[in-house]
Amino acid sequence: MLGLSDIKTGKKILWDGQPYVVLDYQHSKMGRAGAVMRTKLRNILTGATIEYTFQDKDKFEEAETIKSTAQYLYPEGDEYHFMDSESYEQFALPAATLGDTAKYLIEGTEVTVLNYDGHAINVELPVKMEFAVKDAPPGIKGDTASGGDKVVILENGLTLTVPLFISAGDRVIVNTEKGTYVSRA
């Protein structure tokens, strides 16, 4: 059983019979009263986000999620299809479950799949991914008064702010957690 001290960002817990991932937490203690932990939790199965305050006496279990690898295949309607790297079985996840992760998916991308109770429930991308720049306005020599940035369009349709020296056809590395430019590949 886990207690208040075990709550950390990214921790997967079972609460009220449902698996949750901790998005944010804040510990507080007021005088004689016991410690409390204010948390923001996302239901792993439904994607719903709740805020809950745990008391010092609350105990909970860790949600058993198993990670495996899969390859992204294609989108179809409101679903994204993947193939398990070991069993070669195909499965689909709805766009609502993937959230912002879906905008970084390109055919053939290797992803980490979170499995709960024998079912794929979500995917995790690598922190840094490489993309080709599809369209970029020309950088004007000497135009650095505005910080030296411009907006380009990547091969997956995503817009990204990059330095002026990036041009169409270049490959860039993007931080998928923050959605920011890291470096030229």
Image: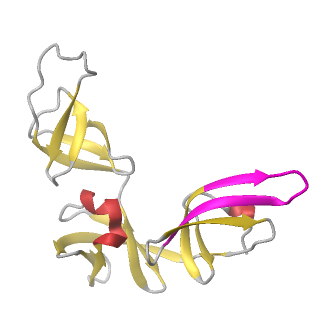
Who's the residue at 15% across and 52% down the image? 157
**Quarter in which the C terminus is drawn:** top left
Side of 151 relative to 92 (left or right): left
Who's the residue at 36% across and 72% down the image? 97
Q: Answer above or below: position of 88 versus 173.
A: below
Q: Answer above or below: position of 15 versus 176.
A: below
State yes or no: residue 137 in magenta: no
Query: Closest to the observer: 172 or 149?
Result: 149
State the image coordinates of residue 165 (x, y, percent, origin top left): 17, 26
Side of 95 relative to 22 (left or right): left
Quarter assignment of residue 141: top left
State the image coordinates of residue 21 (x, y, percent, origin top left): 54, 67
Quarter assignment of residue 134: top left
Who's the residue at 8% across and 28% down the image? 138
Among all residues in the image, which is located at the extreme top?
142
The chief SS type of the magenta part is: strand
Q: Answer above or below: position of 148 versus 13.
A: above
Write the start and end of the magenta stretch as one range.
25-43
